[in-house]
Image (cartoon, rainbow, N blue to C red):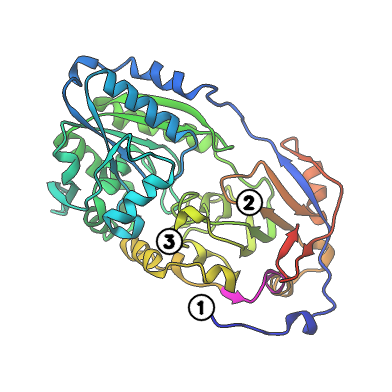
């Protein structure tokens, strides 16, 4: 348990009063798939069913949350069974889940998957199926190779640590996810600054030398709803993924303000972003590669209030914050968090920010270190970096909001309130 940090801030800075807040609606493109099952079945018409009969087919399952994932996976299951195939789930998440079989299986089950409906094979065994030009070995799940075929399923989205033609998507799932801990560690040892070249090189080799049969790509809108689900033939994955990434980037959510003095984030988590909080929203990547994040506002101080339950204590990303509470730190599974960071070769996301006893203390310290008059301090509170359609902002943001067509005011102004433990109850 983290030590108490009693700085008597409330007494020392009793002159601080927080500005009033308003709730704001951010408007994004809301195009989405209305009926996921029907959309998946329509795309599966592209598949030659005769090639699946009597075969054991693995379906990849990553560690990132995908809205509608259960509908997609069960529709795919029914399709495979109808074709005479046996569907099997292969957890494909590199070193996540504590880099062990049970942890990865638990993550898949936490998404609501019934183990009575699917066999889940989650060992960490790998086989070397190729080499990069520099001789680096490419590891691939032995469980996956022992099956008759693999369907790559993943969402296509901007990565939290690097920019390129291929970021988070099908190729990265093949290289890192199906590489298990060994494969993830081997490629991350090359450094994120090389991923722009490594992912396409490794992806091409794996597509040529593995039993991948096709991919299912999911692109989400800014509200985290699937707006596109597409079955992609193996031969087309390389080209199509590049095109889908452009669509994903054009539809990603953001805080539509130019400057934020204090960003309060209710929760971070591995189901939200690989970095717990998406640097594409905060502008703070965990790596030293800061290119490509300039669409995010300039943020002075970040306060973290909680970790999602499905992260199982992996608070990777907390290191990009400035302030958090003892309650949050007491939830951290340091083994899971450190394993993730060491494998990714980026230690910054696992560092601890300033840890204080409660959220009121965090707000006081953020205020005292912003070097602005109270009435000019721009506070933004968000639930997480995925859900940005409704946010709360301080009155200093009002003038900018009134000039924008993509933001609208939802409430009257109100006070920031704290509960008996001096944690935020209303903001």
Q: Residue at x 41, y 22 (%)?
A: 40
Mark 2 residue element: loop
Q: Say whether residue 360 is left or right of residue 323.
A: right
The residue under label 3 is 287
Say whether marks 3 and 1 touch (CB < 8 Å).
no
Nearer the observer: mark 3 or 1; the answer is 1
Q: In the figure, 186 relative to 166: above or below?
A: below
Which of 157/21 is in front? 21
- Tell me which corner region of the image, top left, top right, bottom left or bottom right, holds residue 341: bottom left
| Residue 244 visible in the displayed image | yes
Which of 35/81 is in front? 81
Say whether marks 2 and 1 touch (CB < 8 Å).
no
Neighbor class of circle 1 (other Cα within 10 Å; few <14, some 14-19, many 20+) is: few
Query: Alpha carbon of mark 2 to alpha carbon of mark 3: how far?
Result: 24 Å
Q: In the figure, 59 relative to 352: above or below?
A: above
x then y, percent, for residue 366: 69, 70
Query: Alpha carbon of mark 2 to alpha carbon of mark 1: how far?
Result: 26 Å
x then y, percent, for residue 300: 65, 64
Q: Residue at x 30, y 45 (%)?
A: 91
Nearest to N terminus: mark 2 or mark 3? 3
The residue under label 2 is 383
Q: On residue 1, which mark appears?
A: 1
Nearest to N terminus: mark 3 or mark 1? 1
Quadrant the C terminus occupies: bottom right
Mark 1 residue element: loop
> What is the magenta range?
354-362
Q: Say whether residue 385 is left or right of residue 346.
A: right
Query: Alpha carbon of mark 3 to alpha carbon of mark 1: how far?
Result: 29 Å
Nearer the observer: mark 2 or 3; the answer is 2
């Amino acid at each position: 348990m983290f030590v108490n940090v009693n700085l008597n801030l409330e007494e020392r800075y009793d002159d601080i009063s927080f500005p009033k807040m308003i709730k704001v609606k951010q408007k994004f493109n809301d195009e989405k798939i209305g009926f996921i099952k029907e959309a998946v079945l329509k795309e599966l018409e592209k598949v030659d069913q005769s090639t699946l009969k009597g075969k054991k087919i693995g379906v990849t399952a990553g560690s990132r949350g995908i809205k509608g994932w259960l509908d997609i996976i069960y529709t795919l299951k029914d399709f495979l069974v109808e074709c005479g195939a046996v569907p099997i789930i292969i957890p494909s998440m590199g070193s996540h889940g504590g880099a062990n079989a049970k942890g990865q299986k638990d993550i898949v089950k936490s998404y609501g998957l019934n183990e009575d409906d699917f066999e889940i094979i989650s060992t960490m065994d790998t086989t070397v199926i190729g080499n990069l030009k520099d001789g680096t070995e490419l590891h691939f799940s032995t469980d996956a190779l022992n099956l008759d075929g693999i369907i790559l399923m993943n969402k296509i989205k901007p990565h939290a640590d690097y920019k390129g033609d291929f970021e988070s998507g099908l190729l990265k799932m093949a290289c890192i996810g199906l590489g298990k801990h060994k494969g993830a560690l081997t490629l991350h040892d090359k450094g994120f600054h090389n991923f722009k070249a490594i992912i396409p090189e490794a992806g091409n080799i794996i597509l040529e030398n593995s039993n991948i049969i096709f991919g299912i790509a999911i692109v989400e809108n800014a509200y985290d709803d699937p707006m596109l689900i597409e079955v992609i033939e193996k031969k087309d994955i390389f080209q199509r993924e590049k095109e889908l990434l452009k669509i994903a980037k054009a539809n990603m959510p953001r805080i539509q303000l130019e400057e934020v003095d204090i960003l309060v984030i209710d929760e971070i988590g591995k189901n939200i972003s690989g970095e717990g909080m998406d640097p594409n929203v905060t502008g703070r990547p965990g790596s030293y590669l800061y290119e490509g994040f300039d669409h995010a506002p300039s943020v002075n101080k970040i306060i973290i209030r909680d970790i999602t339950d499905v992260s199982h204590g992996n608070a990777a990303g907390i290191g990009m914050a400035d302030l958090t509470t003892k309650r949050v730190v007491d939830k951290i599974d340091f083994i899971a968090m450190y394993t993730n960071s060491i494998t990714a070769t980026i230690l910054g996301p696992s560092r601890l920010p300033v840890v204080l006893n409660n959220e009121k203390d965090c707000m006081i310290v953020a205020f005292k270190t912003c070097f602005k008059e109270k009435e000019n301090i721009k506070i933004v509170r968000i639930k997480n970096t995925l859900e940005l359609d409704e946010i709360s902002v301080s009155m200093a943001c009002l003038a900018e909001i009134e000039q924008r067509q993509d933001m609208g005011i939802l409430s009257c102004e109100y006070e920031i309130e704290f509960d008996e433990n001096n944690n935020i109850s209303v903001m």
